Amino acid sequence: MSKRIIRVSGKKIIPAVSKIKGSMLTAVLSNGQTFYGKLDSWSENSLVLSDQRQHRHSFSINELYEVVFDQISQA
C-alpha cells in the first residue's frame, strides 16, 4: 500500500480536509510555524487540531499557508 503526501493551500483547504476528519495532518502557518495533530473539526473559516498532548489548536484559514497530509491510495 503506497502513500502520497498531499499539500493543499488557499481556498482548496476546506474541501480537502472535509474528507479526512480524524486523520493526522500538518498545518503550516504563513509565518512558517508548523503544527501536527489530528483534525478535530473545521468550518469555512477555521480548522481545529488536537496535538499529541491533546492540546487543541484553532487556526483561521487566513493564517494557514498550507496543510499537508498522507493519502492512502486505493489499490
Image (cartoon, rainbow, N blue to C red):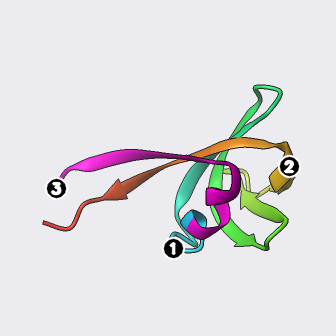
Q: In this view, does 44 lie to the left or right of 25?
A: right
Q: Where's the N terminus, which quadrant? A: bottom left
Tell me which amino acid carries mark 3.
Answer: Met
User: Mark 2 to mark 3: distance in Å?
Assistant: 34 Å
State the SS at label 3.
loop
The structure residue drawn at horizontal position 51% and vertical position 73%, both measured from the top left corner, is: 19
Q: Earlier in the sequence, mark 3 or mark 1?
A: 3
The quarter in which the C terminus is drawn is bottom left
Q: In this view, does 13 lie above or below 26?
A: below
Q: Residue at x 72, y 51 (%)?
A: 53
Label placed on residue 1: 3
Give the CA separation, mark 1 to mark 2.
Answer: 20 Å
The residue indicated by pointer 1 is 19
20 sits left or right of 12 in the view: left
Query: Where residue 56 appears, x then y in whole percent?
Result: 82, 59
Residue 13 lies in the magenta stretch: yes
In the image, the segment drawn in magenta is 1-15
Q: Which of marks 1 and 2 is in front?
A: 2
* The furthest residue to the front: 11
Taking depth in this image into account, of 62 and 54 the one nearest to the observer is: 62
Quadrant position of residue 45: bottom right
- Residue at mark 2: 62
| Side of 64 relative to 15 (left or right) | right
Amino acid bearing label 2: Asn
Q: In which quarter of the image is residue 46?
A: bottom right
Is residue 18 positioned above or below 2 on the image? below
**In front: mark 2 or mark 3?**
2
Q: What residue type is labelled 1?
A: Lys
Q: Where is residue 7 in the image (x, y as percent from the top left)?
A: 51, 44
